[in-house]
Image: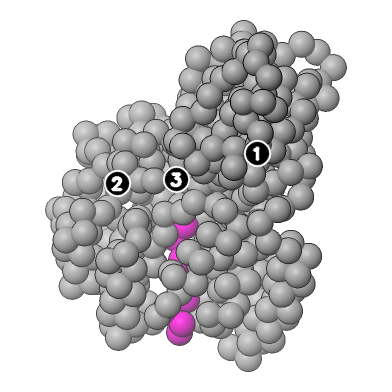
């Protein structure tokens, strides 16, 4: 059954052309613009939404998320106050991920998918870790996202940090998932992945014509470890092992790179994902795109599910540390869509739309749209969301599942998670 956005102002996400029109959206990948027709007669079974005064454009995609962190908000302090990035991982995130089970993962995924949808994000690229609950974790996340109606590209964060047996489980979970789903081969970071596991992951990606998704030089510890153990820098190690051969491969963070590493990346088909809010939170440094090429997009690293916020953070922080302007900030926001399309992943066609109820005191048009996007439009203005032709958010409310019940479930699982963390 189609949805008709009546009397909408459509903003082309590439040209910024503004068009007053009726938009017919269905499960067909393309959208239809209709004017001067009787919509009720032509589409008798359609859901018609009056969008007079509202703005419609392509919805957003998140280039790097962490479902597993969804229930961290409000949790107690770690047993030891971290003094560096490695201890942040050790005492917070690696303590948390060891306590996850499939029930907690399901609640985390539902909460994340709901947050994505309500922020106008209809596609999420996720990087998951649950070392003591590996088997079935990706399918659990996929089912939750499918219930809400958010498309996804998942991977399991393979690592030797909890032992070789768990690394093997990560490889097995990845292969089992890739047999029936689009996805990537996930690796935590160079400093927790040994040579055997790295080679196995590359071979697995090649076998399923997939790419890898790995954190790269988020902190200088990654470089120090690589130099001490492999006598080379992180990007050099990854290049030597064939990690950088695919346009499907995603390198997360990329903060602490030298010029040679940046040149290697710029000459490779891979993509770099910037996560400004997380970098600020972890106090690991500032992103600088210089020398990396144009294949850069934005993620949240599990901090939130708001891509407009990620774009604004990249722009504002970048004033002091990066060569970024309105246009390049927007390009990084939209490059996630480009990545998905270029690599022929499904779930992000033109029938993915967000409707903004934007109470601007000044005119918005094709000439100043980017200024409004940086300084005015926020996720609070998201009114309706259409994912793959299906209306999943209407008047700011989720239509696909019972949001209240899902969040009550998440609160219950959050308490369970926090109790387990106190034991470790």
Residue located beneath label 1 in the image = 45
Residue 416 locus on image (x, y percent): 68, 84
Q: CA distance from mark 2 to mark 3?
A: 16 Å
Q: Is residue 108 magenta?
A: no
Q: Residue at x 72, y 33 (%)?
A: 48
Q: Residues within 10 Å of mark 1 (few under 14, many from 20)?
A: few
The foreground one among 226 and 24 is 24
* Residue 67 seen in this snapshot: yes
Q: Check the picture and name the quadrant holding the N terminus.
A: top right
The residue under the point 66% across, 33% down is 44
Q: Mark 1: which secondary structure?
A: loop
Circle 3 is placed at which residue position? 347
Tell me how far mark 2 sits from mark 1, CA to CA: 39 Å
- Helix, strand or loop at label 2? It is loop
Q: In this rendering, would 320 be left or right of 132?
A: right
**x and y, in percent, of residue 152 in the image:** 46, 54
| Residue 46 falls left or right of residue 383 | left
Which residue sits at x=36%, y=29%?
294
Quarter holding residue 23: top right
Q: Nearer the viewer, mark 1 or mark 3?
A: 1
Task: Give, as a single range, the part of the protein colored magenta.
Answer: 126-134
Q: Could you tell which of marks 2 and 3 lies nearer the N-terminus?
A: 2
Residues under numbered marks 1 and 3 in contact, where contact means CB atoms less than 8 Å apart: no
Query: To which residue does mark 2 refer?
Result: 248
């Amino acid at each position: 059954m189609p949805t008709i956005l009546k009397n909408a102002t459509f903003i082309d996400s590439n040209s910024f052309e503004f068009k007053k029109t009726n938009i017919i959206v269905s499960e067909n990948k393309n959208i239809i613009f209709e004017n001067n027709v009787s919509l009720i007669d032509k589409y008798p079974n359609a859901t018609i939404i009056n969008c007079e005064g509202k703005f419609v454009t392509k919805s957003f995609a998140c280039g790097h998320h962490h479902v597993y962190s969804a229930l961290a908000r409000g949790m107690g302090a770690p047993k030891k106050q971290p003094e560096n990035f490695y201890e942040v991982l050790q005492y917070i995130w690696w303590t948390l991920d060891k306590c996850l089970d499939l029930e907690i993962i399901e609640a985390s995924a539902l909460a994340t998918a709901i947050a994505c949808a309500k922020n106008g994000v209809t596609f999420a690229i996720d990087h998951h870790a649950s070392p003591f609950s590996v088997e079935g974790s990706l399918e659990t996340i996929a089912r939750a996202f499918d219930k809400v109606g958010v498309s996804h590209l998942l991977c399991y964060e393979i690592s030797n940090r909890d032992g070789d047996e768990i690394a093997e489980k990560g490889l097995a979970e990845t292969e089992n998932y890739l047999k029936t789903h689009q996805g990537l081969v996930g690796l935590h970071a160079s400093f927790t992945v040994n040579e055997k596991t790295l080679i196995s992951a590359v071979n697995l990606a090649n076998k399923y014509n997939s790419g890898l998704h790995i954190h790269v030089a988020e902190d200088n510890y990654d470089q120090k470890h690589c130099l001490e153990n492999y006598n080379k820098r992180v990007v050099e190690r990854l290049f030597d092992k064939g990690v950088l051969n695919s346009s499907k491969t995603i390198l997360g963070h990329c903060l602490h790179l030298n010029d040679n590493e940046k040149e290697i990346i710029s000459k490779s088909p891979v993509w770099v994902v910037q996560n400004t809010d997380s970098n600020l939170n972890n106090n690991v440094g500032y992103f600088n795109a210089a020398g990396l090429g144009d294949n850069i997009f934005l993620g949240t690293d599990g901090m939130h599910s708001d891509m407009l916020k990620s774009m604004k953070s990249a722009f504002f922080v970048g004033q002091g540390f990066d060569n970024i302007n309105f246009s390049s900030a927007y390009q990084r926001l939209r490059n996630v869509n480009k990545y998905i399309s270029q690599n022929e992943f499904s779930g992000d066609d033109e029938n993915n739309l967000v409707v903004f109820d934007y109470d601007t005191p000044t005119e918005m048009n094709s000439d100043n749209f980017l200024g409004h996007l940086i300084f005015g439009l926020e996720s609070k203005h998201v009114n309706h969301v259409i994912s793959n032709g299906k209306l999943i958010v209407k008047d700011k409310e989720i239509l696909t599942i019972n949001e209240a019940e899902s969040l009550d479930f998440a609160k219950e699982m959050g308490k369970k998670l926090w109790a387990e963390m106190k034991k470790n």
